[in-house]
Image (tube, rainbow, N blue to C red):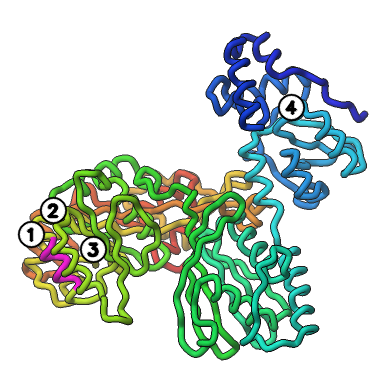
């Protein structure tokens, strides 16, 4: 039977149950008038009541369940019966159907007007549940993808281009919000932000257009038959970046800022001429994520404490190493954020500048005009810095300047493209830097990778294959802690991948006298032996395996970051 929710006065209910006082209610009502927000949200924001306590009270008074959406198995075909506009307007989500009745979760199930409209839209009986608003919004972002909308807009734009048959070289994009090209790009960016994509690839093929998004380090592809829209998309994006729209033979780089779903996103774009047209890659830097905090880079507490201790040394060189896409930039910016105090002069040499930080002097390397890392560093040293960040050590000259700066009273932080911490020091020697200088300057190396997290919703037990078990036995030489392993089965929350999000795996190396002595003798073998004998050193493969034993990631991901093949 379709029963309307009881009409209750939330404020009176909370006062009656002695959760808030009359004075707190009066104050909240005044704040509500100013903000226009719902009373419950206002009370939570003011700190007068905890969200879970409020929802549990609503659940009890209305006689409906309180569901935690993070643990819920969604059925996308059920969820999408409720249009996205209605779901977001009323903070509601369709959950499951039983005997012709639809269970609908609401952040405010006492809203009778919302209830009536949802029943009208669905055209069937519903039962209510109360859910956390934050979990509901996250679920909506995950379940309402823009895929069909993108395909529809692409087709509309393709038809428009065909009808007008104009020269794209002279194409003037419209500023109107309802222009097909504007709506298509808006949908592409919204979809990317919803799934937390780090990059968008727009790639024209011979007969189709491929739009790919990198989510949790893996590309997801959408293929469109409207290849003729590729030039229009490229042209519009070039204009947004302020690039030369007539130049199609040379690569170009640019950036712009957009606001997508209350997220301020900095977009860094690169173009590349290909056989079938210009290929675009856009790196999305979400400034609202707050991921520049050193406490959020994913280090274990004991390792983080040692890293912070290293950062607060008065001088020396700290290296962060790993391949492209391993999270080095996040770690570097996290380190800068920790060091960013009024009493320190911090200067960076970057290519490109990814995040803008207050109080820090950030210099963009521009090799086209001869302003390379070496020249920027020489200029930086004349600016009386306490801390220098070198975006990347690419050549011998840059390495020598960075090391000499570290030896002359400066703290230098930089990145290096190597596979592990052990090879970093030898890499500098291979570049031509004297071993005794490397030994004197470096005091800490952090190597890192990113592994995908197992989806919490569809996590299940996993029995290792024979090959994986051999590797586990090899890594755990003492076989003291076999533990259990897990994998994700695949569900709507993780887009059927079995993974949701990523976590950093770190290898932390502090140089001691034995390591420095080996470097002075340029002995790679002795250096490796000295590292293995170090008390606190844990290789990347072992650190990743510990995450697998804890159920954070899979053995598949461990093998990937350990650069071994499974059969």
Residue to which mark 3 is pinned: 422
Check disc 1 and report its element: helix, strand or loop: loop
Report the number of discs: 4
According to the picture, the residue beneath numbered tag 2 turns out to be: 315
Q: Which residue is mark 1?
A: 408
Q: Earlier in the sequence, mark 4 or mark 3?
A: 4
Residue segment shown in magenta: 398-405
| Residue 148 % position (x, y) | 75, 64
- Residue 346 position (above or below residue 179): above
Crowd class of label 1 (few under 14; some 14 to 19; many from 20; radius 10 Å): few
Q: Quadrant of residue 205?
A: bottom right
Q: Please tell me how crowded label 2 is: few (under 14), some (14-19), or many (20+) other residues with Cα within 10 Å.
A: many
Earlier in the chain: of badge 2 and badge 1, it is: 2
**Mark whose residue sits in front, 1 or 4:** 1
Task: State the residue position of label 4.
Answer: 65
Badge 4 or badge 2: first in the primary sequence: 4
What element does badge 4 sit on? loop
Q: Is disc 3 surrounded by few (<14), some (14 to 19) or many (20+) residues within 10 Å?
A: many
Q: Residue at x 59, y 79 (%)?
A: 235
Q: Quadrant of residue 403?
A: bottom left
Residue 352 included in the magenta stretch of the image: no
Q: Is residue 324 left or right of residue 221?
A: left
* Upstream in sequence: badge 1 or badge 4: 4
């Amino acid at each position: 039977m379709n029963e309307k929710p009881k009409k209750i006065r939330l404020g009176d209910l909370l006062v009656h149950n002695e959760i808030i006082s009359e004075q707190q209610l009066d104050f909240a009502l005044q704040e509500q008038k100013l903000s226009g927000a719902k009373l419950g949200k206002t009370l939570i924001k003011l700190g007068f009541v905890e969200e879970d306590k409020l929802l549990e009270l609503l659940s009890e008074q209305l006689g409906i369940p309180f569901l935690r959406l993070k643990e819920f198995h969604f059925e996308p075909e059920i969820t999408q019966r409720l249009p996205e506009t209605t779901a977001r307007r009323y903070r509601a989500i369709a959950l499951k159907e039983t005997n012709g009745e639809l269970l609908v979760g609401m952040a405010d199930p006492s809203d009778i007007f919302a209830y009536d409209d949802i029943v009208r839209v669905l055209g069937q009986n519903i039962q209510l549940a109360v859910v956390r608003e934050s979990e509901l919004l996250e679920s909506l972002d995950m379940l309402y993808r823009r895929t069909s909308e993108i395909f529809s807009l692409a087709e509309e734009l393709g038809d428009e281009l065909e009808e007008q048959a104009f020269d794209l070289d002279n194409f003037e994009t419209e500023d109107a919000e309802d222009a097909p090209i504007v709506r298509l790009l808006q949908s592409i960016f919204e979809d990317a932000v919803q799934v937390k994509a780090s990059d968008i690839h727009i790639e024209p093929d011979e007969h189709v257009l491929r739009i790919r998004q990198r989510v949790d380090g893996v590309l997801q592809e959408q293929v469109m038959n409207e290849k003729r829209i590729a030039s229009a998309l490229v042209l519009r994006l070039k204009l947004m970046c302020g690039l030369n729209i007539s130049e199609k033979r040379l690569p170009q780089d640019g950036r712009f800022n957009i606001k997508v779903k209350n997220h301020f996103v900095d977009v860094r774009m690169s173009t590349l001429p290909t056989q079938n047209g210009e290929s675009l890659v856009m790196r999305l830097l979400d400034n609202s994520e707050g991921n520049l905090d050193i406490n959020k880079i994913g280090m274990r507490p004991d390792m983080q404490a040692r890293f912070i201790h290293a950062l607060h040394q008065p001088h020396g060189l700290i290296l962060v190493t790993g391949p492209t896409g391993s999270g080095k930039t996040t770690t570097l910016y996290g380190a800068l954020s920790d060091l960013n105090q009024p009493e320190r002069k911090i200067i960076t040499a970057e290519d490109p500048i990814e995040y803008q930080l207050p109080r820090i002097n950030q210099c963009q390397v521009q090799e086209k005009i001869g302003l390379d890392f070496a020249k920027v560093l020489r200029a930086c040293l004349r600016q009386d810095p306490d801390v220098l960040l070198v975006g990347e050590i690419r050549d011998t000259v840059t390495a020598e300047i960075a090391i000499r700066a570290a030896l002359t009273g400066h703290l230098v932080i930089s990145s290096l493209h190597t596979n592990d911490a052990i090879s970093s020091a030898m890499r500098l020697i291979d570049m031509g830097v004297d071993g005794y200088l490397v030994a004197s300057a470096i005091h800490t190396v952090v190597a890192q990778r990113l592994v995908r997290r197992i989806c919490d919703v569809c996590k299940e037990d996993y029995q290792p294959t024979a090959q994986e078990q051999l590797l586990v036995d090899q890594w755990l030489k003492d076989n003291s802690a076999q533990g259990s392993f897990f994998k994700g089965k695949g569900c709507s929350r993780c887009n059927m991948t079995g993974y949701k999000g990523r976590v950093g795996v770190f290898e932390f190396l502090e140089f001691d006298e034995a390591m420095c002595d080996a470097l002075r003798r340029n002995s790679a073998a002795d250096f490796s032996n000295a590292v293995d004998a170090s008390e606190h050193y844990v290789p990347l493969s072992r650190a990743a395996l510990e995450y697998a034993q804890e159920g954070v990631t899979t053995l598949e991901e461990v093998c990937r970051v350990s650069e071994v093949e499974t059969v």
